[in-house]
Image: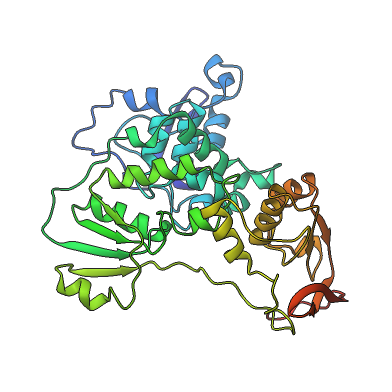
């Protein structure tokens, strides 16, 4: 693909014009190119059908859509697309979106898995900042980039992708934690020929993917198959093996590991700093989710109040509904517009009967004999934004 800014001059009449190029080739080896045109036949980007039918001005259309001419003189793009620049993993978004468009799900997964090993997981829980940066937002709404990733992973099993790995090397790496960071490190090391062992404190692998995200958002079979994809490369996972008195970094280095990668995760919640929050019946959201995800149940009352407006608060509320709570309410100190939770998750919670109260901040947990009996709150109003 080229843009008009990369073309120095277009001369000639409609249907017979000459292009002067001032960029160097990028993807094509000029020494091997025979101008056979095969690249144009398989290119996923196409001009509108009116172009081929001769119903519109070909020269104007060429300037507008800037279709690359088959041959060695391909044009080098000046920068990556905004969606790719917004992706923390730097995924080739346009590549796999175009493959999904053509129904080439295996090809789409190959593009995705050049950079990350969890397409089905991220196709469900990725924050998808790429969609906020999508150029289509300037027209109507963004391309559903995250959902297309999920579609590809649902249509073709990622375990069936042939992953190319370099020859095995002698070094081994120890990875502490089997969450997304630990799993990704093990995957990329395996592709470079370096085997690793993951040490996980919990009884099952996955880290916060397993214990921090409810199964209704991330089905366990999806997580399990993508962990299996990584273990199929020779990665070993040891569960119930925490870093601590019985296993130190020095122990790992002395036992033959050449490096240790710490991917411990963020498993602790933030305290409110108000009186009474240590009372029986008050739970941290992440602790509640861990218990629910590992055991399928958690101790709670008939009426549940959740403080916060992020995705964890939404997850806790929807789990509480599923566990049989009669009344579930989310208390948030600002308005809906400021809630960090995704709008789609908020709407799902509301559809399941969760009540949301805005401009409400807790001041004290009311207790009797150490047991929570109520929550005293204060009504808020928005002020001018500050550094926080």
Quadrant housing the C terminus = bottom right
The picture quadrant where one finds residue 178 is bottom left
Quadrant housing the N terminus = top left
Give the percent coordinates (x, y) of residue 72: 29, 35
Furthest toward the top, the residue is 53
Could you say which is closer to the camera, residue 300 or residue 65? Answer: 300
Furthest toward the front, the residue is 369
Q: In this view, does 201 lie to the left or right of 379?
A: left
At a point 72% along the width and 67% down the height, the residue shown is 308
Q: Is residue 137 left or right of residue 93?
A: right
Q: In this view, does 110 lie above or below 299?
A: above
Furthest toward the left, the residue is 170
Give the percent coordinates (x, y) of residue 330: 78, 61
Give the percent coordinates (x, y) of residue 345: 69, 50
Is residue 361 visible in this depiction of the protein?
yes
Give the percent coordinates (x, y) of residue 197: 25, 59
At a point 70% along the width and 54% down the height, the residue shown is 320
At a point 52% along the width and 38% down the height, the residue shown is 150
Could you say which is closer to the camera, residue 26 or residue 238? Answer: 238
Q: Is residue 344 above or below residue 86?
A: above
Is residue 26 visible in this depiction of the protein?
no
The picture quadrant where one finds residue 113 is top left
């Amino acid at each position: 693909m080229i843009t008009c800014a990369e073309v120095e001059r277009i001369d000639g009449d409609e249907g017979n014009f000459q292009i002067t190029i001032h960029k160097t080739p990028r993807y094509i080896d000029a020494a091997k190119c025979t101008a056979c045109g095969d690249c144009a036949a398989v290119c996923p980007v196409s001009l509108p059908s009116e172009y081929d039918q001769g119903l519109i001005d070909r020269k104007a259309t060429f300037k507008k859509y800037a279709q690359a001419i088959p041959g060695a003189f391909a044009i080098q793009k000046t920068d990556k697309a905004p969606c790719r620049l917004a992706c923390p993993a730097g995924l080739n978004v346009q590549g796999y979106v175009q493959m999904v468009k053509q129904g080439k799900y295996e090809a789409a997964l190959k593009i995705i898995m050049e950079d990350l090993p969890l397409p089905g997981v991220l196709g469900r829980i990725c924050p998808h900042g790429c969609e906020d940066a999508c150029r289509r937002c300037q027209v109507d709404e963004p391309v559903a980039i995250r959902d297309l990733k999920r579609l590809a992973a649902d249509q073709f099993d990622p375990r069936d992708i042939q992953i190319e790995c370099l020859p095995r090397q002698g070094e081994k790496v120890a990875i502490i934690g089997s969450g997304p960071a630990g799993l990704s490190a093990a995957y990329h090391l395996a592709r470079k020929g370096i085997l690793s062992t993951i040490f996980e404190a919990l009884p099952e692998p996955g880290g916060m993917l397993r214990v921090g995200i409810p199964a209704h958002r991330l089905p366990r079979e999806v997580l399990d198959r993508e962990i299996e994809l990584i273990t199929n490369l020779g990665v070993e996972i040891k569960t119930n093996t925490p870093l601590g008195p019985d296993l130190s970094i020095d122990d790992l280095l002395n036992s033959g590991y050449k490096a240790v990668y710490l991917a411990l995760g963020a498993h602790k919640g933030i305290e409110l700093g108000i009186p009474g929050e240590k009372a029986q019946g008050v739970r941290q959201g992440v602790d509640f989710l861990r218990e629910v995800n590992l055991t399928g149940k958690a101790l709670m009352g008939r009426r549940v109040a959740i403080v916060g407006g992020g995705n964890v608060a939404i997850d806790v509320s929807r789990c509480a509904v599923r566990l049989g709570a009669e009344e579930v309410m989310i208390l948030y100190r600002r308005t809906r517009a400021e809630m960090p939770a995704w709008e789609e998750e908020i709407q799902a919670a509301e559809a399941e009967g969760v009540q949301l109260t805005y401009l409400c901040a807790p001041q004290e947990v009311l207790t009797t004999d150490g047991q929570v009996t109520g929550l005293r709150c204060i009504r808020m109003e928005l002020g001018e934004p500050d550094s926080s």
